[in-house]
Amino acid sequence: MGKWQKIILHAVLALLFVALGFGGFMKLGAQRPRIKKKRPHSPLPLVEVIEAEKVSHMVRVHAYGNVKPAQEVQVVAEVSGRVTHVSPSLIEGGFVREGELLVRLDPRDYQIAVTLAKARIKEAESRILILEAESQQAREEWALEGGSQGIKPPPLVVKGPQLEAARAALEAARAQLQKALLDLERTELRAPFDGIVKEEQIGFGQYVSKGQSIATIYGIDVFHVLVGLEREELKWLKIPGFSGSGGLGSKAVVHASIGGKRVTWRGRVVRAGAHIDERTRLVPVIVEVAEPYAKTPPLAAGLFVEVEIMGPKLGQVVRIPRSALRPTDRVWVVGPDGTVFDRKVKVATTYGDVLVVVEGIQEGDLVVVSPLKVMTRGMKVRITERTINP
């Protein structure tokens, strides 16, 4: 076999092997199972829901305000004089009892006035006795001289005008004595009620003029808390003289944190303020707290407190978190088939982050409480439940 024949034979064999390899590869490829193409599924949105439950709910209106005393007076001197005694209690923050002697002024001038008034009474009484005797004597002389003719003696003869003047002088002397005794009593300034000294403006040895203030005292029997309420909140409350309902006002609870301790006092709404605040448009309501100093620490004047006013008890309502409410007072509800739809609801009141719904939600409804950027009626969702603390 020649050289060129060998080359041609080798080329034919190489081509044959390549053809056989390619044929085998194609056969194997034809026998491999084909993978079907599928469109990927979009995951369903996950939402948080709560299961609606019908419950009873006590309406509570929350507000904040400042504490102030119901009684606050200035103790004013009604006579003048030098201070000879000052009570140890007459200091800022001092407790005083009703009738306690706070300040005594020098009484000597007024004691002298009492003595002089008593002397004038004695003088007037003596003058009347003399005139009465003279009048009696004049009547007897008139009877002896001309009484048989039936003519009454003239008033001047029987000392009539003089007696009237003497009796008037006696009444004036007695009035002067009463005035002197009253002025003497006023040299002692006493506490008008149980209270605390807010400020004092007097010192021992100081000369006090009539009408000068010596101290400011406020009572501790009753304190007031002035709170501002929205007009919509007033429909739940009883406010004597304002809401049209007679009897006692709504009960209230006053909370304050003092020295790291939360203290509570019971109170009651007693009246509304004189006018609505022009700046905030809130209605002022006054809550009265009795015996504010019965606890330690006390409900001190000027304290900023939280007030919880009790309203009526509502039955068959649903409580939902504020996050469940959508614009135009609607909520999303998940149906049995996993689709969502919206409902119009009526919110009666709120407290904190909880809404009290009286219409629009049924027992057992799954209400969506988590936010979603996009949600449409009929959209399918996955759910996870949670509860709220009402």
Image: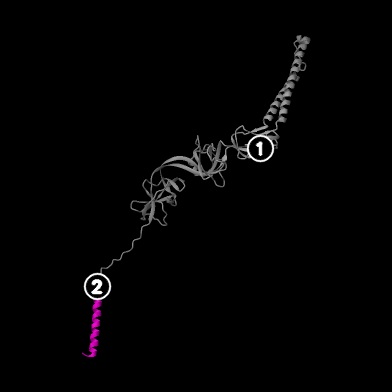
* Element type where label 1 sits in the image: strand
Q: Nearer the viewer, residue 109 or 352?
A: 109
Where residue 92 appears, as percent x and y from the top left, is: 62, 40
Q: Nearer the viewer, residue 365 or 2?
A: 2
**Which dot, 2 or 1, sits closer to the camera?**
1
Classify residue 321 as left or right of residue 87. left
Q: Which mark is residue 214?
A: 1
Distance between the alpha carbons at the discs numbered 2 and 1: 117 Å
Q: Residue at x 74, y 19 (%)?
A: 126
* Helix, strand or loop under label 2: helix
- Residue 120 vertical placement versus 287 (above, below): above
In this rendered view, identify the residue nearer to me: 29 or 229.
29
Residue furthest out toward the front:
88
Identified by mark 1, the residue type is Ile
Quadrant in the picture for the N terminus: bottom left
Image quadrant assignment for residue 67? top right
Name the quadrant containing residue 47. bottom left
Magenta-span inclusion, residue 13: yes
Counting from the top left corner in percent of width and height, residue 155 is at 75, 17
Secondary structure character of the magenta stretch overall: helix
For residue 361, the mark is none
- The part of the chain drawn in magenta is 1-23
Whether residue 15 is visible, yes or no, is: yes
Neighbour class for label 1 at 10 Å: few (<14), some, many (≥20)?
some
Place of residue 313 in the rendered image (x, y in percent of width and height, measured from the top left)? 44, 40
Image quarter of the C terminus: top left
Q: What residue did someone put label 2 on?
A: 28
Can residue 230 be seen in this snapshot? Answer: no
For image coordinates 25% across by 82% down, the residue present is: 14
Q: Earlier in the sequence, mark 2 or mark 1?
A: 2
What's the amino acid at mark 2? Leu
